[in-house]
Structure formats: structure tokens, C-alpha cells
Image (spheres, helix red, strand yellow):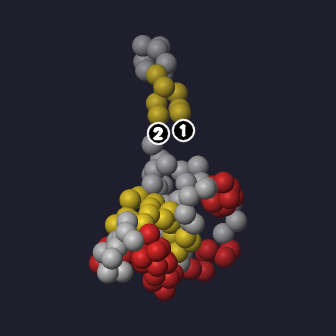
Amino acid sequence: MVGHHRPSHGRRLDVVRVMSRKVDTVQRPLVKQLEAHGATFQSTAAVGRGCPDGFVGFLGITDPVEFKSGACAAKRKSKTADMQAEWRRKWRGSMCWVITSWPDCERMLESMRRRARLNGAWEAA
């Protein structure tokens, strides 16, 4: 978002405001649990424009992740939600997980573990 500011001497300056992206309340505790299970997380919240909240890396596999607060996930219909759905539709990489709870994380980690075994990326998976 660009605003304009006129200092007292008349010149116009462009002021760029960096808006912090809202992080769903479930994200922080779930990321801590993922990390406790050996996964890593890279936030992409600052990117916006429908990009997922971040990427989870586990056993050589990387998946995009969108965190949603449980009850709100089903109800939320907004421009942001539309952009997220569009991003997921166009994405040609691995599936974007929509995570609302720890059981969702467990399913994602198990999927990543299976793919790591198939790829031979992790012998003991």
C-alpha cells in the first residue's frame, strides 16, 4: 500500500506501508509441534496474494501449507480465501495442505514419510 506524504517544504514523498499479515491462531502451536517431530517450517506470510502460509520440509520432501482456525475455515469466504484457492488451483508442485489441527499435521507427515520412502530419500522412513 503506497500513501503520499507532503513534508512542510512542499515535496511529495511516497511512503510504503508494510502491512503485517495475520497469522491464524493455530499456526504457531502446530509449527512448534511439527518442529518437535523433525520437520522445518518456512513462513511465506509476508508474500500475500494467495501464497500459502509457508512450506514444511520433512525427510527431503517439501509441501506448501495453509493454516486455518478450525470453525473459521469452513465459514471464511473472502477475497483472500479466493486468492488462496486460485493459488492452489494453479500450483503445479506438491499438494497444498490446509491444516486446522494436529491430526491434519499427522496426516501430512505420514504422507511425506511415504513419499520419502518411495523416493529413496530416507532409508529408515
Residue 14 point in image, percent of width and height: 48, 25
Comparing 36 with 11, the one in front is 36
Secondary structure state at the residue bearing disc 2: loop
Where residue 72 appears, as percent x and y from the top left, is: 61, 75
Identify the residue at image location x=58%, y=49%: 49
Q: Residues within 10 Å of mark 2 (few under 14, many from 20)?
A: few
Query: Three-letter amino acid code at disc 1?
Result: Met
The quarter of the picture where residue 74 lies is bottom right
Q: Position of residue 56 (x, y in %)?
A: 42, 66
Residue 17 is labelled as: 2
Tell me, for residue 1, which label it has, or none: 1
Please tell me in which quadrant of the rendered image residue 79 appears. Answer: bottom right
Label 1 neighbour load within 10 Å: few <14, some 14-19, many 20+: few
Residue shown at the point (51%, 70%) measured from the top left: 67
User: Do tag 1 and tag 2 residues touch (Cβ < 8 Å)?
Assistant: yes
Q: Which residue in the rendered view is the most extreme toward the bottom?
A: 103
